[in-house]
Image: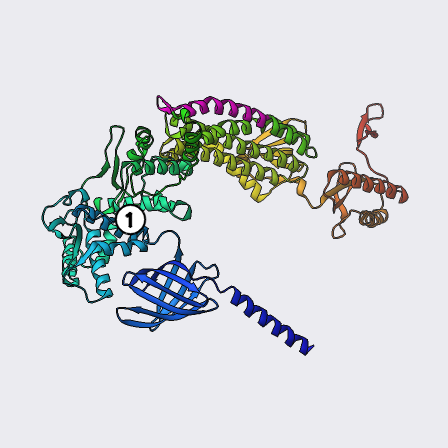
Amino acid sequence: MIRARILCTFLLAVFSSHVWAQDAGDWSGNWDTYWRDGEAQMQLQQDGDRVTGTYEPGEGRIEGRTEGRILHGSWFQDGVEGPVMFALSQDGQSFTGRFADGEYWNGKRVTGTVGSSGNFATRDTPRAAFRSLVFLANAAVYDGDISAVNATEALLLYSGGTSGVRDERRRRRLLWTILDVSTFRIYDAPGHVEGETANFSIGPAGANIEYTIRFRRVGNVWFVVVPSASDLRGDLNKMISSFGYDTLSQLREATANSPRAAMRDFLMGMRTWRTGGRERALQALDLSFVPPRLLSFEAPLLADYLKQVIDRAGYVTWQEISNNPNRAGSYVFYRHPAGSIVIEQVADLEGGQAKWKFSSDTLRNAPQLYGQMQGLPVAAGISAFEPITSFFEMRERIRTRAPSLLVRYGSLEFWQWLIIPASVALSAILGWLMCKGMSILLSRSLHGAERGLRIGAARRVGKPFGLLVGAGFPVLVFTWSGLAETILSAATLALVATTVVALIWILYTAIDLAEGYFQRRARRTSGFVDEIAVSLISGVLKIGTVAAGIIAIADITGIPYEGVIAGLGVGGIALAFAARDTVSNLIGGAILMSDRPFHRGDLIETESRMATVEHVGLRSTRMRTFDDSLLVIPNSQLTDKSIVNWGQRRKRKIRLEISLHYDTSRHRLDAFKARLRKVYLDQPAADDTTGYVGLRSFGESALNVELWGYFNLAEFDDYVAARHQLIGDIVDLARELNVVFAYPTRTIRLLSEENDGKEYEQSASQSA
């Protein structure tokens, strides 16, 4: 066994090393690389286990050998060299490495032609050289295009020479920072110049300070002159101070909320929309006019419209847009008779700092503005942009396959006019099918349910579902086809509101059906708590559903829902005052549910009225009197008065008064009393802790014997039967002991004149 394990381990190690050797990866290609204070584009070539290459800027060189996915070697630059070690990732698209004394050096593989951004580096005039520099610097810093870093070297001329690559890198970054904190118009830079030098003054927006960009011509090529690092640092500090800040980080934090930042956030967010840029792009837009329920539909479409307009307006250079966070008034980026692109400060609803965003009017006018300039191609230098909404994707397909459908008639294109009647007809058909389908589906699926629930659901649920589909389908179509942002915007809002009404209708009906179902189940039990709970819960749910629907519709139609909520609150208070008795009865119903003073079928007595409880509702309680009359009492009266619940007795009292003839002897009286107690205790329902028997009083015509006790019975029917049995046993006892029950007798004394007034008696008897 041990030998087998050793053999398996050896074979696994050999196999793994073989696979690792076979999967060493390929280092050949172009790489964007980064280290702590720099970046370079590297080109590597692998031949067997040997790897060589170069990196720019700096004319650096790499040599090394691979061991699996590890590259060991050296770097060479400016007569200096050092060790380097790179580890290739499993997918071969990146590497992680170190150089010198533990400094990191990482990279990612790139495709395309090395230095492709350099194609933009034209230098025939100072303006062309300056435009190229700004373009490449923006591409390097904001787009991460390292090839642009290499391309800038062809545009720069370092004043007084440099002390090496580090000095060049430091001076490039300082110059770029000065450009980035400034606001200028590239068109104002010098065009064709006869001399060998030229100057261009730039500076921060809203500050009284300038920096001079110097140009020098060498042969027929113009360069941007880069001063020394100390001069650049001094000029940069003056610019920072002109804004009123002490450090560059403070300045960058402040300018992060500016017209330039809004434009940059929007465009860069749109470029990375599907990889996390959505939120960044939408934060730069004032979408306060869009109802929250429609944001998920309308916001991307408005963003798409705005992006298409900006791409046709011209190539956006960040530094041509004001970065002054304290700018007075709005910033107009583009003007057109059909509308303008404006960035303005928008107040924060939570009381925070106002934010620079594209104005709401800009977004409202974006569809019309796009319609006016859609025939204009996008500006040069703008990369291909994939639309983020289905509207522009569909429109592009139509443009490719049937361009005649894009002809505009009025405010809509022909294909949009075709969609309107088609969507209306289709929505009507789908709504009808949904109505009938839901009715049939519920009828069949609820075949095992109660008949009332099945019929009610089949009849009542189909209509709201049909309305939901009939109104919701055109909303989806109008949004998908861009009609929601045209003359049909009001119709779209109305359809959305109708969809909300349908949803509320469905919820309300579902609550009502559930209430009926649970009420029917509650009536099968003796308790009434379930009935009150069902009524109370369903009532609250219905009110909440209707209130939520009103707020949602107000939100969709643009009515401030805070006012609606306040109105509902004031209306609720007024209603409470106007219906004090009703509210009191509702509270009384809740109290009855909590205290449970009686159940259905109990015989109760309140205010000298006795009746049997039939139903307890939220507002009132229904009872049946002994003469079969229906008695309805408000719940508030029941909770405010005392209630005698005869139906909740644990045992019932039995009290009998037995009349014996006056001729009964004492001996028989004592025997009857003793045997009477035993007869009572022998009853199955008798409470053996009671049973009090004895002579009670002298009656008019009898000696009264009293029997007093309890039967352990709750139901009245059982009590009547037990009482019957007891009285029958007493009759048998009297016959056994030869005791005579007395009945009312009356003795009359008469005086006869014939007998000289002698008195004689005549007894008269009458049955009791």
554 lies left or right of 707: left
Q: Quadrant of residue 250?
A: bottom left
Q: Is residue 323 visible?
A: no
At a point 60% along the width and 26% down the height, the residue shown is 436
Does 551 appear in magenta?
A: no
Q: Secondary structure at mark 1?
A: helix
586 lies left or right of 519: left
Q: Quick check: 347 above or below 87?
A: above
Work out whether residue 421 or residue 680 is closer to the camera in this orientation and state it: 421
Work out whether residue 550 or residue 581 is closer to the camera in this orientation and state it: 550
255 lies left or right of 65: left
Other residues around mark 1 within 10 Å, as few (<14) / some (14–19) / many (≥20):
few
At a point 32% along the width and 30% down the height, the residue shown is 375
Work out whether residue 493 or residue 361 is closer to the camera in this orientation and state it: 361
Quadrant location of the N terminus? bottom right
Does 415 appear in magenta?
A: yes
Which residue range is magenta in the image? 407-435
SS assignment for the magenta stretch, majority? helix
Residue 633, horizontal then vertical, whole percent:
57, 31
Q: Quick check: 165 above or below 469?
A: below
Residue 245, horizontal then vertical, whole percent:
18, 56
Work out whether residue 497 or residue 507 is closer to the camera in this orientation and state it: 497
Residue 752, horizontal then vertical, whole percent:
82, 25
Residue 297, horizontal then vertical, whole percent:
42, 36
Q: Is residue 499 visible?
A: yes
221 lies left or right of 419: left
Q: Which residue is mark 1?
A: 119
Give the amino acid at mark 1.
Asn
Q: Quick check: 248 above or below 442?
A: below
